[in-house]
Amino acid sequence: MKESILDVLLYLFEHYFTNDAFDHPGDDLTAQNGPLMGELTEAGFSVAEIRKAFDWLDALARQRPAPGQPRVGGPTRVFHGAELAKLDTEARGFLLFLEQHGILDADQRELVLDRAMALDQEELELDDLKWVVLMVLFNQPGSEAAYAWMETQMFLDEPEPVH
């Protein structure tokens, strides 16, 4: 059996979200006894992990900003405690890079951190963090260009730097 919430989320993202099967993550995923639950258990995921993944998506959907809500820059982010333990220097640097280059704003960065910390992994590798960023951007209205750039970076052999 597959053990990680992130494995379930990646399966959903690759098989449903990118194929426009759902308009927004979390909208139709909370039917925890529906056909999607059956498909995920057949794919080898435990019911507990599936439910945790659904809860993760619900929390992401609840934190979506209201349409037209302005996003303002925030102060410099200082990581501490559990964040330092879970995210290595490379991952934290990547978040800073994305924010400095306009891929993420301060609110989105905080949402990425919130969703990364909600995963059941002691440490989060950079590639896993990139998937969290991609899922968060997918869920954010007005982030289509940032999502497209991030998606391109995920699937290129040699990602291009932002200019």
Image (cartoon, rainbow, N blue to C red):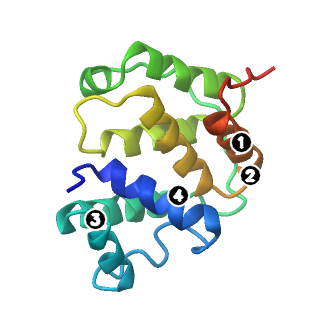
Q: Amino acid at mark 2?
A: Glu
Q: Which residue is mark 4?
A: 14
Tell me the element at label 1.
Answer: helix
Q: Closer to the camera, 46 or 141?
A: 46
- Distance of label 4 from label 3 (alpha carbons): 15 Å
Q: Amino acid at mark 4?
A: Glu
Q: Which residue is mark 2?
A: 144
Kindly report which numbered mark, 1 or 4, lies closer to the viewer in this rendering. Answer: 4
Q: Which residue is mark 1?
A: 146
Tell me the element at label 2.
Answer: helix
Kindly report which numbered mark, 4 or 2, lies closer to the viewer in this rendering. Answer: 4
The answer to whether 120 appears left or right of 6 in the picture is left
Q: Residue at x 53, y 51 (%)?
A: 135
The tag earlier along the polypeptide, 1 or 3, is 3
Q: Which mark is residue 50?
A: 3
Q: Residue at x 21, y 51 (%)?
A: 3
